[in-house]
Amino acid sequence: MGHLQTRHRARSLSVGNGRNQQGFTLVEILVAMLIFAVIGLLSSQILSNSVQTQNIIKDRGERLAQIHRAMQVIQRDVMQFSERPVREYSGDWVPALLLSNEGFIEFSRVGWRNPLSQPRSELQRVGYRLQDGKLFRGYWRVLDRSYDTEPAFQELLDEVDRIEFYVLDSAGQQHKFWPPQDGPIDVPYLLAVIMRIEMAPFGIVERIWELPPIEISSLLRPGAVPEQSGDSAPGQNSDPDATAKNSDGGQKSD
């Protein structure tokens, strides 16, 4: 009896030691490796998406800042609109406002700052045009141009698909050409400039800028030069014809 108990106890110890020494099976190892691989893949995708989202937010922020700066420049020019026409080197008068449906607008403005007190006018001729997908601001250093007068250009926006300018009159009608091509206008005032621009990644954006009080009749009279401070530089005559008269025969105009 004692011998049988001894054999049973030894057998139990042998079986117990075999279980304690048993490791993971191949299937368990493969399952564990699969789980770790899935966790690693998900973590990598989350990190990649996070970095991509941050880059998109950064690019959108820089794009919005660029658009905001461009809008401020255009708004500053429009809100200082002047009724002063300009004269080409040929002697022909150019209206204070030019507008076409090809993404082009040109006009005169006041408030050209002169911190160095240079001998020049405080009026400025500016224009906006779309070329090769870029919006440019051009400006002339003089109002009445000579044959060699060329504008200087500043790039405001890129990746622009389309741009349109309109002027809004006091009757609520929008004009895509100025001077009007369909005859005289019976309303007295222009109220605002409207810009519609299509650009990546925001699509179509519309802005409306209020104009100072402008009588349409003053814009349609060729050569009508309103009296404004700073129209000419010191010692300069804003009317080239008057200068020519002074130089002919040595006579001064009254």
Image (cartoon, grey):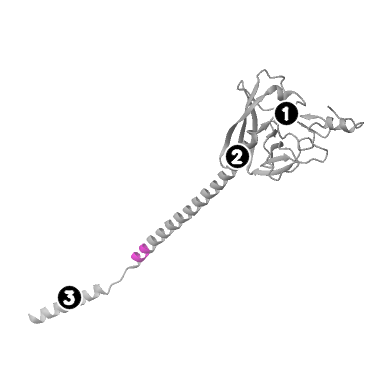
Give the magenta-colored segment's residue range. 27-32
| Amino acid type of the residue tagged 2 in the rendering | Gln
Q: Position of residue 27 (x, y in %)?
A: 34, 65
Q: Is residue 180 visible?
A: no
Q: Of the two numbered discs 1 and 2 on the same chain, state the one appearing first in sequence.
A: 2
Find disc 1 in the rendering and name its residue.
227
Determine the main secondary structure of the stretch shown in magenta. Answer: helix
Out of 225 and 138, give the one closest to the viewer.
225
Is 172 rendered above or below residue 146?
above
Q: Residue at x 21, y 74 (%)?
A: 16
The local crowd at label 3, few if under 14, some if 14 to 19, many if 20 or more residues have their Cα within 10 Å, is few
Out of 115 and 167, give the one closest to the viewer.
115
Contact (CB < 8 A) between labels 1 and 2?
no
Q: Which mark is residue 12?
A: 3
Q: Residue at x 60, y 37 (%)?
A: 198
Q: Of the two numbered discs 2 and 3 on the same chain, state the one appearing first in sequence.
A: 3
